[in-house]
């Protein structure tokens, strides 16, 4: 792990953090205002580099995907991509097509390292195939992550390091496309992924910054939630943070792609090398917009399906902890709020004193529910964004479904009030 990798960051998703608990009706004024999210957050905990690394290499999602979903076409239902009886379905059901159960080919191509990432290495040169495994990093991983993002099979944050989020995205794309579902990128998967992502000529492109790109305000966020009540917004704390989120990446990767550049000093008109995330598109042959959402708690992902049950989009997700699990069963979206304010209710939180007062905290990307709140038909539960994209898929919540801000914004534009949401594989 390089020194520029995440050292420590605030996680709003651990005990005493974001909560979506409680089954009783929420009759407060806040609940009656669709602009105010009733998912809540309390004291913040820290995810250390070691904790993030443990999440990155955790393959526990395979137990749920291959044991519960892939092994039962009836239970998997619409979000099972490979047809029963097909070679890919048979391999998945037997476990023979998994990276854990077959010998891993030796990579063919130049050695890869994170320090080798540059605009030149991302856009040219041979790629070492297959790409995958806990120790994979560098230009090849960056290429895969950008293509996955463009294909709307999100790897979460694009950082140049392989991990469970990237592997899950590859696995589910392979299943949908009828490829051997290994979770690693071989030559066949690489070519198909390039097609699905629009075959961009550049993985990293040069972007000329606009006035909107560099506009603030940038704020110093107090540590205590109550101290934020009088802020105009829970905005970005720096231009570097804003630019990283704008391009679905980490500040460390932006710095690597732009050596000797002070990201916080950039002005409109300056150029910046950025991941070419582009416009995400639905796959050819899809039956319109999102008709149904399927969320796997054990698998830590959200799937968006069309009216024919075809898997359209995959997003890594943070879901409930054992002390406050996500709900199980069928619900629907009751409302969608962009740039929501946030109703902090201590009596619904794990590890927070119930006697603390309620508070309405301002909107912004560093709001604990991020930039979008999609309320569900079960009180106090919803799908929303995050102030800590690095933790998505690797931390836990108090029951709600968290996505990166860019993923939840994309999803919110493709669902509507009434869209069905199913929770399955609840890990208690």
Image: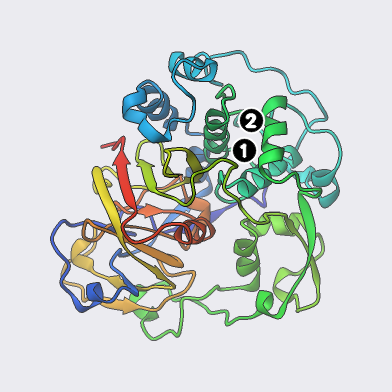
Residue 211 in the image, given as x and y percentages of width and height: 70, 80
Please give left or right for residue 290 compared with residue 138 in the image.
Answer: left
Between residue 85 and residue 40, name the one nearer to us.
85
Task: Give the image quarter of residue 207.
Answer: bottom right
Q: Is residue 106 above or below residue 279?
A: above
Q: Which mark is residue 314?
A: none
* Residue 160 in view of the camera: no
The residue lying at 34 percent from left, 54 percent from top is 419
Q: Quadrant of the C terminus?
A: top left
The residue that disc 2 covers is: 132
Task: Give the image quarter of residue 228.
Answer: bottom left
The residue lying at 14 percent from left, 64 percent from top is 25
Between residue 342 and residue 239, name the one nearer to us.
342
| Label located before the other in sequence (2 or 1) | 2
The residue that disc 1 covers is: 162
Residue 100 in the image, given as x and y percentages of width and height: 53, 19
Please give left or right for residue 86 compared with residue 124 in the image.
Answer: left
Gap between marks 2 and 1 measured at Cα:
6 Å
Between residue 379 and residue 263, name the one nearer to us.
379
Residue 180 in the image, given as x and y percentages of width and height: 58, 21
The residue lying at 81 percent from left, 59 percent from top is 259
Q: Quadrant of the N terminus?
A: top right
Residue 21 in the image, given as x and y percentages of width and height: 22, 56
Q: How is the image coloured?
A: rainbow
| Tags 2 and 1 touching, CB below 8 Å | yes
* Residue 291 in view of the camera: yes
């Amino acid at each position: 792990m390089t020194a520029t990798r995440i050292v420590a960051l605030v996680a709003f998703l651990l005990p005493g953090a974001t909560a979506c608990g409680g089954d009783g009706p929420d009759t407060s004024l806040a609940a009656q205002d669709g602009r105010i999210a009733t998912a809540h957050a309390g004291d913040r905990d820290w995810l250390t580099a070691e904790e993030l690394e443990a999440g990155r290499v955790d393959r526990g999602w395979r137990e749920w995907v291959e044991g519960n979903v892939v092994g039962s076409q009836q239970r998997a239902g619409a979000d099972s991509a490979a047809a029963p009886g097909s070679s890919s379905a048979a391999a998945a059901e037997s476990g023979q097509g998994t990276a854990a159960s077959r010998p891993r080919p030796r990579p063919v191509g130049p050695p890869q390292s994170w320090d080798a990432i540059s605009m030149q290495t991302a856009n040219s040169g041979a790629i070492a195939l297959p790409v995958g495994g806990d120790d994979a990093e560098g230009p090849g991983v960056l290429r895969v992550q950008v293509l996955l993002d463009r294909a709307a099979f999100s790897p979460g944050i694009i950082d140049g390091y392989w991990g469970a989020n990237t592997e899950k995205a590859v696995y589910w794309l392979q299943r949908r496309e009828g490829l051997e579902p290994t979770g690693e990128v071989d030559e066949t998967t690489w070519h198909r992924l390039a097609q699905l992502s629009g075959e961009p000529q550049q993985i990293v492109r040069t972007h000329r910054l606009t006035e909107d790109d560099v506009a603030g305000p940038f704020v110093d966020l107090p540590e205590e939630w109550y101290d934020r009540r009088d802020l105009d917004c829970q905005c970005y704390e720096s231009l570097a943070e804003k630019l990283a989120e704008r391009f679905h990446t980490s500040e460390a990767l932006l710095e690597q792609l732009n050596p000797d550049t002070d990201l916080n000093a950039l002005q409109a008109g300056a150029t910046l090398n950025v991941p070419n995330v582009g416009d995400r598109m639905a796959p050819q042959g899809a039956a319109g917009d999102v008709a149904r959402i399927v969320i796997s708690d054990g698998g830590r992902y959200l799937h968006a399906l069309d009216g024919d049950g075809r898997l359209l989009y995959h997003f890594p997700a943070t879901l409930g902890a054992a002390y406050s699990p996500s709900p199980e069963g069928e619900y629907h979206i009751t409302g969608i709020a962009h740039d929501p304010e946030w109703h902090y209710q201590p009596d619904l939180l794990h590890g927070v004193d119930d006697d603390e007062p309620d508070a309405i905290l301002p909107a912004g990307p560093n709001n604990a529910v991020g930039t979008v709140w999609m309320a569900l038909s079960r009180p106090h539960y919803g799908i929303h964004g995050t102030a800590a994209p690095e933790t998505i898929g690797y931390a836990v919540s108090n029951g709600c479904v968290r996505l990166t801000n860019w993923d939840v914004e994309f999803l919110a534009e493709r669902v509507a009030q009434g869209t069905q949401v199913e929770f399955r594989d609840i890990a208690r």
